[in-house]
Image: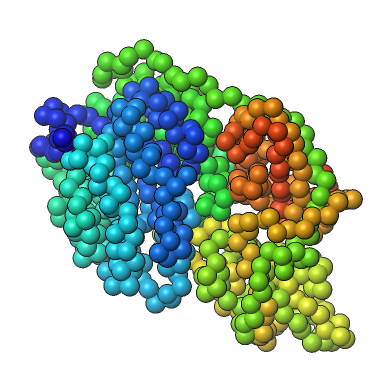
Amino acid sequence: MSFDFSVKGNQFIFNGEPIQLISGAMHYFRVVPEYWEDRLLKLKECGFNTVETYVPWNLHEPAEGNFCFEGIADLERFITLAQKVGLLVIIRPSPYICAEWEFGGLPSWLLQDKGMRLRCFDPHFLEKVDAYYDTLMPLLIPHLCTNDGPIIAMQIENEYGSYGNDQKYLQYIKKAMESRGVDCLLFTSDGPTDAMLQGGMTEGVLATVNFGSGVNEYFDKLEEYQPDQPIMCMEFWNGWFDHWGEEHHTRDAEDVANTLDQMLQRNASVNFYMFQGGTNFGFYNGANHGGQYEPTITSYDYDVLLSEHGVPTDKFFAVRKVIEKYMTLKPLALPDPIPVKAFGEVQFTECAALLDSLQALSSPLERTCPETMEELGQDYGFIYYETTISGPRKNNKLVLQDVHDRALIFLDDKYIGTVERWNPQDLFFDIPQNGCRLGILVENMGRVNYGPLIKDYKGITEGVRLNGQFLFHWTIYPLPLHDLSTLAFKKMTEASTMPAFYKGVFHIDQPADTFLQFSGWKKGVAYINGANIGRYWEIGPQETLYIPAPFLKAGENEIIMFELHGTSQTSVTLGEAPMLAKKQLPAAD
């Protein structure tokens, strides 16, 4: 049995009746699976009838030909839960998703082919897309509305008009889906401008637009290009994301409610981007590059209807109130709150210095020139380069040509300075009579996820010079840091001023959500029971890291902090509230 979802004139039709889609974005890959049903129930209780999610290629094919659809990547389970709750589903499985996600969802291994052109009719790129779709699409087909599943629509590309105008490519992706059995509604989403719509729309595919305000102006523009069709805002930006070094963006709840009211008055459909933002666990945060490189923080709270840890905000209740004006809702019946607990201070008792642990963490490679992570088959994390320099030499200027993204420099294992992609500065030093070892630790802080600079190689992308002289013959240690079990920890006597791993244990009776407060720590990555919960950095706006209860266990738990710059702290605190330094977004017009 199947049910019908279609377009008739300027309306969506669901089983023969007009329907106004009120959808919310929730990314299964940013929420632990144990909480999917809780979040979906809250979306339904807010008055929504649809959930939307991207599908990140890099999560599902982390290495070419090796696919993952388990755990947090179990897309089918997420779709099944949505149907159980009573929600329709919109899927956006484009090769590229943006989403402030690492490389916009593209897998890093694509960059091993330096001649490949991304997001266009390049046979090399399309060959990889086809191989991915050969695995992905058969998983989605049973869940289409035409097969009695909840998926009513799928996107063929994401905001393509912001990037290019290759109609041959867009039609190829459309046919790649259809030829594999996708027979539900297909759509595009783009910014509401002439250039973006002209570049991103394609024949036989419904166009939608993305915006945060300017309802009538932007829907008018969509209708100019697509008359007598349903109008939908596929991304209603009711909050915003944060870069490191910024303040946390917020938007007034009543302002959001008023903008929604304008859309519903116009009989438009809407998808809230986001309904819940969630968390960029691990190394999956992306980055932007307008005037300069800007990496995104670990939290994807987004200041939306549910907080990062799933608590309804003022926006939730303001939005529900507006929806009640247009349709009858049952009395609000939210799931029981998920427990949050402050577990208190955790002392670190053991330490492992990074430079002493290179052999334990990595197998060294010998190369004539520094090579990028991608050339070495590495996806995320860090990479360490080391070479020897003859001496004596006076007043040498070190040039990293070109570093992506942030490098710590060492001479004979002593830290001498940092070189940042967005804040280049010169380092000068002398080389003693007997020469020295030069070490460079580079952090991949997230590949660019939007715009013309998404082809973003990591590490040292060209070379290293002293003044005008290139340095050759390097020992390279890839440090993806997926597994820290090989580290040899020693009893800690005092905190180090060098990059090091700190380990502490704590005991709990019952797991609960909690928040790691890293005050006094400078920059690094935190691990809970082996799981990478994300990056921290003293520059903010993020001042805590979210730890969902499923990452914990009754009894003994382990925290490891990989601190890059040393700390005077010997502990962290597990508190009961998130901390984000806020910045108010301007009200909509």
Above or below, comparing residue 98 to residue 84 in the picture: below
Percent from the top left, x then y, of residue 166?
A: 25, 65
Relative image position of residue 422 (x, y in whole percent): 59, 62
**Residue 57 rendering spot, x and y as whole percentages:** 40, 56
**Residue depicted at x 54% and y 25%:** 338
- Does residue 393 appear left or right of residue 150 in this picture? right
- Left or right: where does residue 425 sit relative to residue 566? left
In the picture as drawn, the residue positioned furthest to the front comes out as 555
Q: Check the picture and name the quadrant holding the N terminus.
A: top left
Instruction: Indicate left or right for 552 with 17 as reference.
Output: right
**Nearer to the camera, 312 or 93:** 93
Q: In this rendering, does residue 209 appear at all?
A: yes
Residue, x 48% and y 25% (percent of image)?
Answer: 312
Please tell me whether residue 32 is drawn above or below residue 466 in the rendered image. Answer: above
Front-most of 521 and 56?
A: 56
Up-down relation of residue 534 to residue 345 (above or below): below
Query: What residue do we see at 66% from left, 51% from top?
Result: 525
What percent of the width, then of the height, locates residue 293?
Answer: 54, 59
